[in-house]
Every structure is written in C-alpha cells, then in structure tokens.
Amino acid sequence: MVSSLSNAALERGADAPEDRLAAVDVARGVAVVAMVIYHCAWDLSELRLIATRVTAEPAWQVFARTIAASFLVLAGVGLALAHRDRVRWRPFLRRLAVVAGAATLITVATVLVFPDSYIFFGILHAIAVSSILALPLTRLPAWASAIAALLAGLAPLAFGGGILDAAPLAFLGLGSRVPVTNDWVPLLPWAAFVFAGIAAAKVGLPRRPAGAAASGRLGRALAWAGRHSLIVYLLHQPLLFGALSGIVQLTGPNPAAVAAPFARSCAASCAATGQPEAVCRATCTCTVEALRRAPLWADVMADRLSPEQNAEVGRLAQACFARSRPPG
C-alpha cells in the first residue's frame, strides 16, 4: 500500500537540523506509523493468521489510500521547502537516485517473493516520477500547482482505454484495467497529491522553517521516524513478514482464515438462490463446523472428495440450511 516514504529520501527541506520544519517531520512520522500498522494487518491476512481479507475490506482500503496520499502530499511539501529559494540540483538528483534505487529494489524483491503480483509502480515509483514532474512547480506561484493538481486528478476521467491499456503504460493509471500487483500507485491521479502538497506549502507554511525541535518523547520519536522514513519503509516489511511467517510455521494458519474462502463461496452460491444473507451466513458457518466434525474438512480443502463424500457434504449442507431458515 501501500506504501512509501520517499519523503525522507527525496525531500528533506533543509541542509541542517535547525533549518527543518519539525511539524513536517512529525506528520511524516505519523504516516510511517500508520503504514506499519497497515502492513502488519496485510501480512496477518496474507499469511492467514486472521480471517479478515484486508485488501477487500473498504475501511482498510480507505486507510491504505489515505496513507499513500499523505506521503505524496508530504513529498510535495518537502519539495517546496527544499527548493524554496532556487532549485538545488545536486541534493535533488542525489535523493532522486536514492528513491529510484529503492523503488527498483522493491520491484526486484517482490518479483522474487510475489512473482504473480509484484510491485512495478508503487509509492516509491510514484514519488520519484511525480517529483520530477513537480520540480518546475516549486518556482511558480501556488495557483500553478493547484491547477496542476486539479488536472492530474481529473485526467483518469478524461482519458482511458485504447492504447492506454497497453501493459507498458499501466503506470500512467489511464487504462481501463487494474493490474494485479500488491501496491499500485499510478502516476495519475496520484501525482495530484504531490502538486497539492507544493501548493499547500507555498500558501500555509513559513518561508523559513522555525527550527524548533519536536517536543516530548512521542514527538521526538515521530520526528525521527519521519526523518528516516525511507529506511523504515525498506526494512519494516521484511522484518514483519519474516517474523509472522515464523509464527505461522509454529502455530499454523488461523482455522477461521482457512475456512473463509469456502465460506465466501458457499455464501455466494446460497445468495444466488435468492436466500436472505443472514440465512446464507448461518448455513455456511454451520456447514463448515459440520464438515470439521465429520471429519471431511481436510478432504474438502484438498479437493479430493469421493462421490460418497460429496453426497455427505450435500446432506450436511441441507441439514444446516434447514436449521438456519426462520420458522414458517
């Protein structure tokens, strides 16, 4: 999801700690914490330690997109601060190289771990490319960035399909198909958040950072995470996923998570017959429990039922359905 923090690598808005804006570091740190929470939930779901399908839950989807948007806005804010007087080419190119290199590393790593859903244009890719496009806006008035943000946000509504569906152009976000990938942050409309961040910084932030450090342990911890967000981004998932993979090797997957795909398929088949959702849910839950008691569950999961076992599964499902229907 997300996920991505080129803010630290790309746009430190200053040369020295006293020239930084602590509020931006803290905001970035909050986004880092949110990102770690989301990825922890995603890992638990992917490893079937919890039954919730994080990628299919609307609340989790909104959470992930909010995190991505916050990093992009903060990347724009960082750009505006870093180049408020002039374009500082050497720092910009150095940080751009770091982010682009990290994005490439993410692609290579996910090709190895998730070859069917590797990340070809995630948050780091989006920040790197968006920052190149946004750099000229740092020298223009805030209204220019605001217009650029509006146009980028509306672009997917105005264009789409045809040649834009070609796989090499998927990163633009203008095709009619959503690619299979674990983290997709297409250039459009997401670059709009970087442009909006520049506009917001020009309007709402002081021309010179105040230089005050974050106060309190929590504030200092968040500011530290914000300043080192790229490192946190690159390290936290291997550590989280590795640790949770070790746990699942010891405990096995959550039985409810193992049963979830069967229960969803069962509920969909039941709903297709016109039965109420509550009846279908109760029927399928009852059926899973009955199959475990039979025991037929392992054979159902392995798809190796004999004709006699298939008949028994049908009998159990019918009994559960009869029990779940309201009287009358």
Image (cartoon, grey):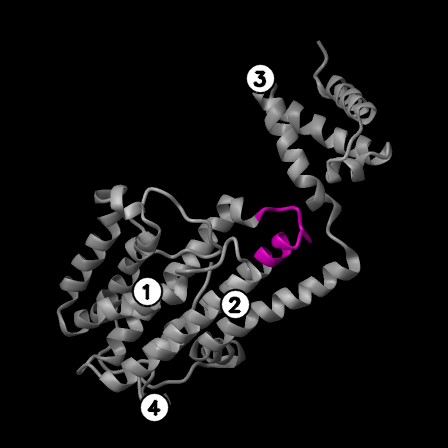
Q: Which residue is mark 2?
A: 109
**Residue 23 in view here:** no
**Under tag 2, what secondary structure?**
helix
Residue position marked by numbered label 3 in the rendering: 274
- Range of magenta residues: 41-53
Crowdedness near tag 2: few (<14), some (14–19) or many (≥20) residues, C-alpha within 10 Å: some
Q: CA distance from mark 2 to mark 1?
A: 26 Å
Circle 2 or circle 4, nearest the eye: 2
Q: Residue at x 73, y 21 (%)?
A: 324
Front position among marks 3 and 2: 2
Q: Would residue 47 appear left or right of 182 to someone viewing this image? A: right
Q: Position of residue 295 (x, y in %)?
A: 86, 35
Closer mark to the observer between disc 2 and disc 1:
2
Give the Cα distance between marks 4 and 3. Answer: 66 Å
Task: Give the CA distance from mark 1 to mark 3.
Answer: 46 Å
The answer to whether residue 217 is left or right of residue 223 is right
Secondary element under disc 4, as helix, strand or loop, is loop
Q: Earlier in the sequence, mark 1 or mark 3?
A: 1
Disc 3 from disc 2: Cα separation: 45 Å
Q: Could you give the CA–CA distance between mark 2 and mark 4, rounded to whole angstroms? A: 33 Å
**Residue sticking out furthest to the top:** 328
Secondary structure found at label 1: helix
- Residue on which disc 4 sits: 16
Give the residue type at disc 4. Answer: Ala
Q: Which residue is mark 1?
A: 73
Q: Nearer the viewer, residue 145 or 121?
A: 121
Name the kind of residue labelled 3 in the image. Gly
Q: Residue type at mark 1: give it.
A: Val
Q: Between tags 4 and 3, which lies in front?
A: 3
The picture places residue 317, in percent across and down from the top left corner, at 75, 23
